[in-house]
Image (spheres, rainbow, N blue to C red):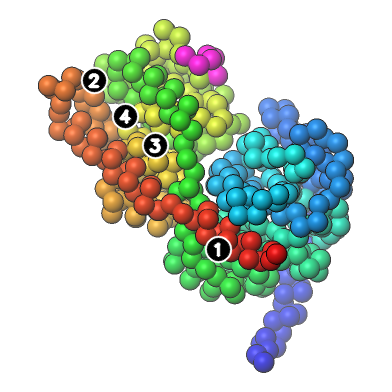
Amino acid sequence: MAHPPPGRGVKEALARAAYALLLRAATPLYLLRLWWRGRQEPAYRTRWRERLGWATPVCAASGAPVTVAEGRVWVHAVSLGETLAAAPLVHALREQRPGLQLLLTHSTATGREAGARLLRPGDAQAWLPYDTPGAVRRFFRAQRPALGVVMETEVWPALLQAAQTAGVPMVLANARLSARSAAKGRRLAALLHPALARFASVLAQTEADAQRLREAGAREVQVLGNLKFDITPAPALLARGQAWRAGLGRPVVLAAVTREGEEAPLLAAWAQTAAPRPLLLLVPRHPQRFDEVAALVAAAGLQLQRRSQWQATPPAKAAQADVWLGDSLGEMAQYYACADVALLGGSFAPLGGQNLIEAAACGCPLLMGPHTFNFAQAAEDALAAGAAERLPDLSAAVARALALVADADAGPERASDAATARQAMASRARAFAQAHQGAAGRMAAAINARLGG
């Protein structure tokens, strides 16, 4: 039997102790930050005791106390993106195991709001506790899951230690680890390597992710694909976006899921575009930045309409605006369906890019910048499939977008090379998304095998 090198156990214990001390000291600051964020997103001020592990299991629909079900599966999806990715997995788990009861946890208000739509009678929903030893011990005593599933990159040392002590097997689903994150993790190897080793199973998106996860300490690793390919855009949202586009009579360029530092240069470039310019549909990644981005649009001297200011149909004056601000949640499919071409947020600054799979599933041609390390394999696969193009910087991407939407509203008799290229990219994007589906069923089978029965 192999034994760990001398001193490794001591290093791990010291690393965990230092980590726990730091988290305990920071807890009051975390709670103050929650209260501050609650000014704009009131959900952050609700049920705050759950953040400390003090919680009575309640029905998500009624708020009434519930009896903790034997065999309940706990799924943690930190924010909106992870919750959307968890949706096809939850559906597959229920399909393969009828009667399954679910505990769903989150760390953000947007994740919790989206997660509520996945719940059925008898399910429960809670905030994930902070990763302090006391909070996570209280969480497991109160909730008593049979098995835990955490999504993508959620590796919490104290939580995993407490799960092991409580006898709860843990699965890291849809797991990914970029080369950049792996390099950072090596500096905290004494803390993170033992944490990854405590997962009973790691279900990786790609072979490259799997290899990095094994090197980082994960033991049982399988490559089962990416759950985000199994997300089906809502037909109602697609239809509404297409109706918006048909009523505009002008091209639409979408800046999808943008991050801080990207909007100002984009708006400056847009203000310099010769009239009549296409409509710019701008959708920031973080809801708390909606007002900030609206101010940037005004500072650029551009006329703005905000999605939050109308119901199902844009007012007539919206067609004359320079920019629409997509300040809503859960409507990305609608925005992709409205657009002739999209620029991928997070990829034009060194931020790693955002998820491009939803754009492909909606058949929206996509232009991305040089920084896609968070979704490296999906980005390379999309390029190889001809579903996306990579540009060296934002200026080049804006120029390419304008070229692609030239004559976008011309009739069939005037169809241009740009229209042909755009339509070919849209077809290839849909085919690319469909070809990579199936991860939800594979991951559900692997998780259900852990549950037995």
Q: Distance between the residues labelled 2 and 4?
A: 10 Å
- Identified at 60% across, 54% down, the residue is 96
Q: Sequence-wise, which precedes: disc 2 or disc 3? A: 3
- Choose between 368 and 431: the one closer to the eye: 431
Which one is in front in this view, the residue at disc 4 or the one at disc 3? 3
Q: Residue furthest left?
A: 413
Residue that carries the numbered disc 2 in the rendered image: 409
In the rendered image, residue 326 lying in the magenta stretch gets the answer: no
Q: What element carries label 1?
A: strand
Q: Magenta segment, principal secondary structure?
A: loop
The image shows a total of numbered marks equal to 4
- For the record, the magenta segment spans 308-313
Question: Which secondary structure lies at badge 3?
Answer: loop
Q: Quadrant of the N terminus?
A: bottom right
* CA distance for labels 1 and 3: 26 Å
Q: Which of marks 4 and 3 is nearer the N terminus?
A: 4
Q: Where is residue 154 in the image (x, y as percent from the top left)?
A: 63, 56
Q: Are marks 4 and 3 in contact (CB under 8 Å)?
A: no
